[in-house]
Amino acid sequence: DLKRMQLSVIPDAEEKSIAAIELGGTDGFSLRCDLENCTDEAGIIAAFDRAVKEYDPDVIEGFNICRIALPLLEKRAKKYKYAFSCGRNDTGFVSRKSRFSVAEKQISFNRYSLYGRHLIDLSHLLLFYDAVHRDFESFEFPYIRDYFNIAPENSAVEAIQSICSLLLPAYFYKCGTLPLSLQDAVLRGSGAALDSLFIAEYQRAGHSVPYPESSRNFTGALTRAG
């Protein structure tokens, strides 16, 4: 019953403003907001905001949305003094600096939240996929489309929907075992996942959660590999 929306923000030639926003949905929903059906860039942003509220998705998926799409949306909305209200409590996007681990890599990114909805960046799913398979020659979207055999006539939002349909279910079912949101299930490592499991069990049993111990010095050992 998960209601998923796909997002593609198309910048202008100089990548300084928004030329169009394409939206899709797993039930066949499709919408393009551009200068042909909106008066100006501010109208494109407002049309996107209304569409999210009306479609009311549980999940919004996109490629590089944390690095490109959402920062551009946020920047251009600020220029027009437009306040997003597409969260389920009529609030907008909230961002903060964050990072996560993928194999030997530490990935820094802008983490976005939208009340009542999960924001899934396909580029993050691809990093975890490649950490296991080690197949990718590139993380550019045209290469990713070819890798997953997405037909050339399919739009960007259709490609995002198809690839997320392959990669997202593992994290969705993970939420049935661990007390994590879908967005957190993608980004949290195994240590944080185990912590959440133990904390949930403490709460279920009616016990308080102990404070972490203060750091202290202790006698250790020295090893040498010859």
Image (cartoon, rainbow, N blue to C red):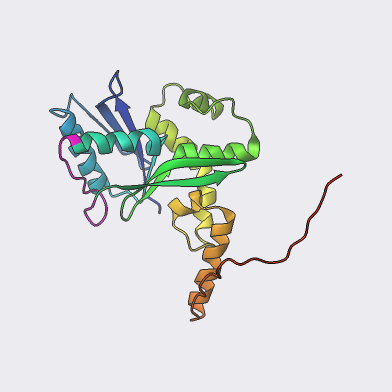
Judge whether 162 appears above or below 206 on screen: above
Q: Quadrant of the N terminus?
A: bottom left
| Magenta-span inclusion, residue 86 | yes
Q: Is residue 18 magenta?
A: no
Pinpoint residue 118: horizontal percent, then vertical percent: 38, 50
* Residue that extends furthest to the bottom in the rendered view of this protein: 206
Q: Nearer the viewer, residue 163 or 74?
A: 74
Q: Residue at x 53, y 69 (%)?
A: 212
Q: Main secondary structure of the magenta part?
A: loop
Residue 219's place in the image compared with 52, above or below, is below
State the count of labels: 0
Q: Is residue 23 visible?
A: no
- Say which residue appears at 54% left-offset and 59% top-offset: 193
| Location of residue 188 in the rendering, given as x and y in whole percent from the top left corner | 51, 53
- Left or right, 50 with respect to 30, comes to left
Q: Which of the two residues, 180 or 166, is positioned nearer the viewer here?
A: 180
Q: Quadrant of the C terminus?
A: top right
One can see residue 67 in this view? yes
Residue in the foreground of this view, choosing between 167 and 125: 125
Residue at horizontal 20 percent and vertical 32 percent from the top: 44
Residue ranking furthest to the top: 13
Residue 70 vertical placement versus 200 (above, below): above
Q: Nearer the viewer, residue 139 or 153?
A: 139
Q: Is residue 141 left or right of residue 87?
A: right
State which region is magenta: 79-91
Q: Position of residue 80 (x, y in %)?
A: 15, 35
Q: Position of residue 35 (x, y in %)?
A: 18, 25
